[in-house]
Image (cartoon, rainbow, N blue to C red):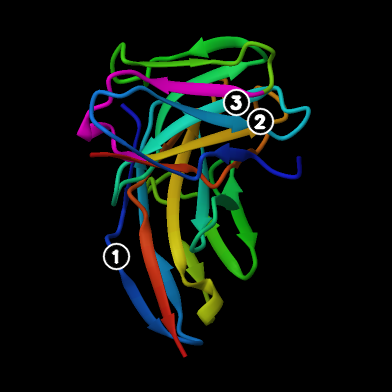
């Protein structure tokens, strides 16, 4: 596609439910990143993939959060047993190479846990 | 650790006014510095960047100079337009590998006609 596509754009879920957020990167982009942005804050790094390999997951807040990119293209960020504090904008970005190339961001998924 | 501090907003200006949004950073090593912009309803877009000390990034009339001595990367524009209304994020990337960006909290700019 022309840009990074994220779905859904908006997700409202009840506390305790699992949610899956999808990211479709720009075609041919090797690297994919997930960030989380709380209201009034800047984005914070969650995790990063190079092709299908998860290279760094140091930003994932706890073991309820996981991510995968099984074929090196589309990625899914899964949050299990959601809590209200998980409410945020979840942003995905991709870049052509691992280093020294621009990261392009999607429009984000706004998650609200009620 | 690595961190970015931005001036709090909102910054409210009239059209054609001069804009400065302050950004300072703390980093280990020699980071690259970025300004991203988020227009209403859109994703983050790279506005400009600088990869080493004294570099000046520029785009769409915006400029920022990488000042190592003051650890700053202030964003400036000589004459703002209503269409510049957006949220601006300063960010750094430590040049040790991949694109792990550290963002500031963002500054909202509101430009009135």
Residue occupying image coordinates x 65% and y 38%? A102
Quarter holding the C terminus of chain A is top left
Q: SS class of the residue under badge 2? A: loop
Q: Is residue B6 left or right of residue B94?
A: left
Q: Which residue, given by chain and number where applicable, does mark 3 sit on?
A: A32
**Residue A19: which numbered mark, if any?**
none
Q: SS class of the residue under badge 1? A: loop
**Residue A100: which numbered mark, if any?**
2
Question: CA separation, marks 3 and 1?
Answer: 30 Å
Question: CA separation, marks 1 and 2?
Answer: 31 Å
Image position, residue B100 (x, y; %): 49, 28
Quarter residue B7 falls in: bottom left
**Residue B9: which numbered mark, if any?**
1
Numbered disc in front, either 3 or 1: 3
- Estimate how packed mark 2 is, as few (under 14), some (14 to 19) or many (20 or more) residues with alpha carbons within 10 Å: some
Label 2: chain letter: A
Q: Is residue B96 above or below residue B33?
A: above
Question: CA separation, marks 3 and 2?
Answer: 14 Å
Q: Earlier in the sequence, mark 3 or mark 2?
A: 3
Residue range highlighted in magenta: A74-88
Q: Is residue B45 left or right of residue B19?
A: right
Q: Are discs 3 and 2 less than 8 Å apart at CB?
A: no
- Estimate how packed mark 1 is, as few (under 14), some (14 to 19) or many (20 or more) residues with alpha carbons within 10 Å: some
Quarter residue A104 falls in: top right
Residue B74 seen: no
Residue occupying image coordinates x 33% and y 18%? A80
Residue A85 in magenta stretch: yes
């Amino acid at each position: 596609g022309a840009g990074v596509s994220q779905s859904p754009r908006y997700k409202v879920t009840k506390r305790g439910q699992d949610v899956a957020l999808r990211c479709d990167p720009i075609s041919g982009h090797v690297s994919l990143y997930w960030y989380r942005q709380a209201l009034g804050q800047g984005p914070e790094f969650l995790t990063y993939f190079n092709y299908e390999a998860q290279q760094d997951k140091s930003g994932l807040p706890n073991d309820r959060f996981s991510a995968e990119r099984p074929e090196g293209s589309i990625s899914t960020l899964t949050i299990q047993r959601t809590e209200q504090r998980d409410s945020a904008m979840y942003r995905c970005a991709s870049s052509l190479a691992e280093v020294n190339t621009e990261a392009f961001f999607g429009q984000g998924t706004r998650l609200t846990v009620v | 650790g690595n961190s970015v501090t931005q001036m709090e907003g909102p910054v409210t200006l009239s059209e054609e006014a001069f804009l400065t949004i302050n950004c300072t950073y703390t980093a280990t090593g020699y980071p690259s510095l970025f300004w991203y912009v988020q227009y209403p309803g859109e994703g983050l877009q790279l506005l400009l960047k600088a990869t080493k000390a004294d570099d000046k990034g520029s785009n769409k009339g915006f400029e920022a100079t990488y000042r190592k001595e003051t650890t700053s990367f202030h964003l400036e524009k000589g004459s703002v337009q209503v269409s510049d209304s957006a949220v601006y994020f300063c960010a750094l990337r430590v040049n040790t590998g991949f694109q792990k960006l550290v963002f500031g909290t963002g500054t909202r700019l509101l430009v009135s006609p």
